[in-house]
Amino acid sequence: MELEDLFSSLSLNDGTDPLNHIEFQVLTEQLPTDIILEEYTDYYLLVAKQEEGTTLVATKISLNDNTASHSNIICANHDSLQAAQFIAKALNLNKPLWLFLCMKNYEDQLISELTNGLIWNLSR
C-alpha cells in the first residue's frame, strides 16, 4: 500500500482539514523513508514508512510533565514502543501524537535519523 493510500484510509480524521501539513522524505540507514506530519485541533498525526518496512507500529502518545503515556493500537515489541516515545519527546508536542510507523527496525540509529529529519524539516 502506498503511503498516501494508507494516510487517506486512516479513520482518525473527522473530515476537517489539517491546520498544518508537511510531507518529505529522509534517508534512515540508507533507506528512503516517506513521512507525513499533520497537525489537527486536538492531535498530531505522523505516518512514516520505509520501502523495506516490515514491522508496523500504531500508537497514541501523550506527554504529561515530561512523561509519555501511550495507548496501543498495534505495537510489535518493546523497542518500537520506546522508539515512539523517543520521537514524541524529541518533538515536544503540546497535543497527543498518533504514530503510524512501518520501519525495517526500531534500533537507536534508525530512530535517531528519523527524529533528526523530522526536527530539521519542522524547523524550516
Image (cartoon, grey):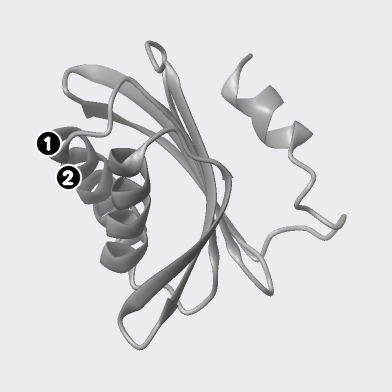
Which residue is at the front of the view, 21 or 41? 41
Q: Real-space Cα distance between discs 1 and 2?
A: 5 Å
Q: Position of residue 39 (x, y in %)?
A: 59, 63
Q: Position of residue 76 (x, y in %)?
A: 44, 32
Disc number placed over residue 112 in the picture, else none: 2
Asked if 45 appears above or below 8 in the picture, the reply is: below
Does dot 1 land on a helix, a strand or a loop? Answer: helix
Q: Which mark is residue 4?
A: none
Quarter of the image with the C terminus in it: bottom left
Identify the image quadrant of residue 42: bottom right
Instruction: Say if mark 1 contacts mark 2, CB within 8 Å.
Output: yes
Q: Give the residue type at disc 1.
A: Gln
Residue 58 vs residue 28, the one in the foreground = 58
Residue carrying label 1: 109
Question: Hey, which residue is sitting farthest left in the picture?
Answer: 109
In the picture, the quarter occupied by the N terminus is: top right
Q: Residue at x 34, y 58 (%)?
A: 85
Q: How many residues crowd around disc 1 within 10 Å: few (fewer than 14), some, or many (20 or more)?
A: few
* Along the viewing direction, whichever of 36 and 65 lies nearer the viewer: 65
Residue occupying the point 37% across, 51% down:
84
Q: Amino acid at mark 2?
A: Ser
**54 to the left or right of 17:** left
The location of residue 101, given as percent across then percent down, is 46, 35
The residue sitting at the bottom extreme is 65
Q: Residue furthest right?
A: 15
How packed mark 2 is, by other alpha carbons closer than 10 Å (few <14, some 14-19, many 20 or more), is some
Vertical order, 117 against 9 (above or below): below
Question: Which residue lies at the image location 14% right of the left edge and 40% below the top edge?
Answer: 108
